[in-house]
Image (spheres, rainbow, N blue to C red):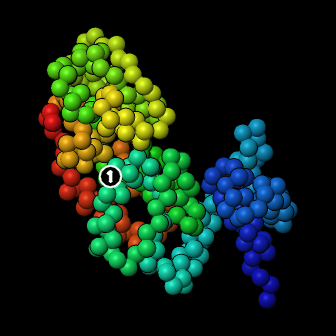
């Protein structure tokens, strides 16, 4: 009996990834081949099928309507294969790999991971902390936490973090701040990677004429946080990341004003992929931990 797969599975996988991600490189990286080899997979598949799968445009390869129509079936098929292989692995229900931002990991997640380990001692956790958005479709990534608007292609996202942000600083610096206008008399730490907005906070604080603020800039948010701890300035940051620093008195909230951001932390996974049990347990634990964190209110 002839094989129903007259196109090799590697070629089908290459086609599915390129159609979903819009580029040759992600398929090449996942399959461990060169972009040229991926291109050859596509060309030979088109020859065997007798149809064109991609339009060659200045923007790259764009799937044709025929491929767009069948793409959900291809994606679902590979998801089923992956789930089947995962079920055959001895460690399928005892390992978990998550990707998170380094600041969220350092300031909020890692101090609490001991509680997750105590609840689920059989799960071996691997934490990939990076500022890059890793492809959640990779077989070695189960899920993650991202900061943003919650709209990423090929990603299912559920909100679990609070959206408020405020200025924070060391206690000795807060003693010099009575009103937002006093920000002109101290250093303001600028995190160059932040999505948070000083103008929006000043408007919420009722400041009509924004003070001239000066201070050091950092490309790494963790270094900006360390500078705030050292008393070197006032840092604008998400409230939820500061709960531990507030509890220990290392930082304070000098003004009783917070702003709700359009950005937030989200639990994320690959769209259409079945979450393995360890990932579901981690998601539920995240939600419970966040619910246990009291909102930050008033001046501290």
Instruction: State the residue at coordinates (45%, 27%).
Output: 217
Quadrant (top left/top right/bottom left/bottom right) for the N terminus: bottom right
* For residue 223, above or below residue 207: below
Residue bearing the label numbered 1: 108
Query: In the rendering, at what x and y percent does residue 233 appear?
Result: 32, 27
Q: Measuring from the top left, give residue 279's x and y in whole percent.
A: 41, 68
**In the shown orientation, is residue 267 left or right of residue 5?**
left
Q: Position of residue 194 (x, y in %)?
A: 42, 34
Residue 114 placement, left or right of 44? left
Task: Tell me if 262 is positioned left or right of 176 in this view.
Answer: right
What residue is drawn where x is 21% and y is 30%? 172
**Nearer to the camera, 181 or 55:** 181
Q: In this rendering, does residue 96 appear at all?
A: yes
Query: Quadrant location of residue 10?
Result: bottom right
Where does the image place residue 292, in percent across and percent down from the top left? 20, 57
Q: What residue is shown at x 15% (from left), y 33% (from top)? A: 299
The picture quadrant where one finds residue 57 is: top right
Quadrant location of the C terminus in the rendered image:
top left
Location of residue 218 with respect to 182 vertically, above or below = below
């Amino acid at each position: 009996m002839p094989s129903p797969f007259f196109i090799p599975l590697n070629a089908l996988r290459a086609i599915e990834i390129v159609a979903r991600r819009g580029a040759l490189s992600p398929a090449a990286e996942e399959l461990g081949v060169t972009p040229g080899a991926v291109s050859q997979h596509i060309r030979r598949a088109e020859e065997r099928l007798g149809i064109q799968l991609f339009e060659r445009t200045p923007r790259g390869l764009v799937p044709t309507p025929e491929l767009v129509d069948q793409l959900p079936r291809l994606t679902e098929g590979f998801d089923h294969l992956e789930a089947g292989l995962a079920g055959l692995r001895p460690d399928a229900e005892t390992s978990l790999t998550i990707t998170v931002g380094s600041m969220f990991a350092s300031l909020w997640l890692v101090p609490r991971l001991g509680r997750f380990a105590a609840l689920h001692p059989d799960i071996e956790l691997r934490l990939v902390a990076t500022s890059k958005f890793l492809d959640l479709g990779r077989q070695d990534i189960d899920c993650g936490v991202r900061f943003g608007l919650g709209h990423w292609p090929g990603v299912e996202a559920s909100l679990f973090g609070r959206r408020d942000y405020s200025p924070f600083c060391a206690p000795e610096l807060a003693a010099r701040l009575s009103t937002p206008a006093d920000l002109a008399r101290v250093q303001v730490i600028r995190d160059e990677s932040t999505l948070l907005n000083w103008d929006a906070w000043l408007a919420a604080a009722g400041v009509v004429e924004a003070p001239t603020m000066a201070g050091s800039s950092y490309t790494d948010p963790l270094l900006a946080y360390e500078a705030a701890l050292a008393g070197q300035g006032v840092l604008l940051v998400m409230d939820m990341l500061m709960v531990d620093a507030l509890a220990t008195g290392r930082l304070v909230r000098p003004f009783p004003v917070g702003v709700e951001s359009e950005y937030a932390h989200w639990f994320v996974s690959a769209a259409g992929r079945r979450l393995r049990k360890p990932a579901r347990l981690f998601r539920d634990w995240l939600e419970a931990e966040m619910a246990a964190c009291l909102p930050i209110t008033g001046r501290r």
